[in-house]
Image: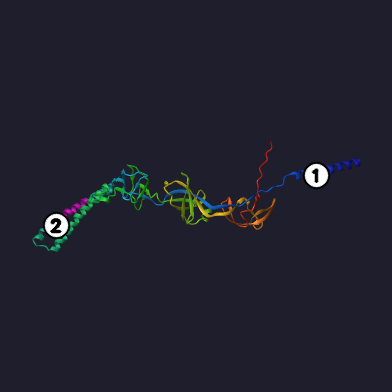
Amino acid sequence: MKKTITILILLFVAAVFMGSLYWLYQKNQEDPVTYKTEKPSTESIVKKTVATGSIVPKEEVLIKPNISGIIDEIYIEAGEIIKSGDLIAKIRVIPNVSSLQSAKNAVQSASILLENQKKVYARQKELFDKGVISANEFDAVDVNYKQAEQEYESAKQNYQIVKTGTARGLGSAANTMIRSTVAGMVLEVPVKVGNQVIESNNFNDGTTIAAIADVGHMIFEGNVDESEVGKIKEGLPLEITIGAIENKTFDATLDYIAPKGKEENGAIQFEIKGTLDDRDTTFIRAGLSANASIILAKVDSVVALKEALIQYDSKTQKPFVEVATGEQEFEKKEVELGISDGINVEVKSGITKDDEIKVWNQIKKPEFSN
């Protein structure tokens, strides 16, 4: 019995030993990890952030009437180039009944006063001609008579203005003829013949009859997130891409950053504006959506590495790379990094363009079995 147990134990030990030898043999048959290398390249690296927005005129003027009424005629169309003083529209005044009646009563009162002064003047002149009254007394009567005439004419003119919006003798000052105050392109005419318009005053912005702007001076107007606004400053260059104009970018300069942010969709956004530089002959329509790449930093023709080749010391957190010194032999070298665009990073010192850098984080392709 004891002999049998001894034999079984020996067989078990032998089996374990043979299994261990087989496992070690298989292990030695696996190919060792072979690291590839890459050389640094010469790149131009641009660090930038992106803002979304649209292209709008730098100055857009809204033409509004200074009298309420009905649009009688429109003389322009969107897209036309006009000069300052050009006729835009004509308004037909619909008088206010109360104002019209007050103006009519004022005419009647002025007429009565004039008739009375006329009679007084006639009597006093007769007395003056006979030498009964002095010249000073007659001059006072003459002044009163002329003032009554003036007030009567003024009352009639005011009545005509209330009734029709204009009066004889006003000429170019007639406010029923709406004229452009600036030169430029007509962007839109939001009213039609027959529409009622409201005058612009201290209590009302008034109805916009036309929007006019100089389309030769356009700006980018957009928003940046609060996480990016601290990285930008006025004077930085912009690269504008417009969705409707393919394969073309426009240069601009950032000249405004809002001092106060606004909440949009749960995030704080800051308004920015950038003036477009010379854009050759390309016509950019107002309101086109656009993206602005704000160039935070830029370097040309520098030694660069892929971000994936950079390692960081677990204790010091300093960047380093492994440089090949022989066949699958590498030496650790600390490097000084510059700006990065997320793919490539500038290497200021630590390696040369001829060094072979270890690709340490290789991704093995998955093996598929049939």
Type of the residue with mark 2: Tyr
Q: Is residue 116 magenta?
A: yes
Q: Residue at position x 89%, y 43% from top?
A: 6
Q: Which of 291/191 is in front?
A: 291
Q: Which colour scheme appears in the figure?
A: rainbow
Q: Which of 19/69 is in front?
A: 19
Which circle's residue, 1 or 2, is located before the other in the chain?
1
Q: Dot 1, how many residues are within 10 Å of its Cα: few (below 14), some (14-19), or many (20+)?
A: few
Residue that sits furthest to the left in the current view = 130
Q: Give the CA distance from mark 1 to mark 2.
A: 143 Å
Horizontal and vertical percent position of residue 22: 79, 43
Which segment is the magenta one?
107-118
Q: Residue at position x 12%, y 56% from top?
A: 122
Q: Please tell me whether residue 357 is drawn above or below residue 1 in the rendered image.
A: below
Left or right of 102: which side holds 213?
right
The total number of labels drawn is 2
Residue that sits furthest to the front in the current view = 354
- Predominant SS along the magenta part: helix
Horizontal and vertical percent position of residue 41: 59, 51
- Asked whether residue 208 is in view, the answer is no
Type of the residue with mark 1: Leu
Horizontal and vertical percent position of residue 365: 66, 43
Judged by depth in the image, the label closer to the viewer, 1 or 2, is 1
Q: Residue at position x 20%, y 55% from top?
A: 150
Q: Secondary structure at mark 1?
A: helix
Q: Secondary structure at mark 2?
A: helix
- Asked whether residue 17 is in view, the answer is yes
Quadrant location of the N terminus in the rendered image: top right
> Mark 1 — residue?
21
Q: Is residue 213 magenta?
A: no
Quadrant location of the C terminus in the rendered image: top right
Question: Which circle marks residue 121 in the picture?
Answer: 2
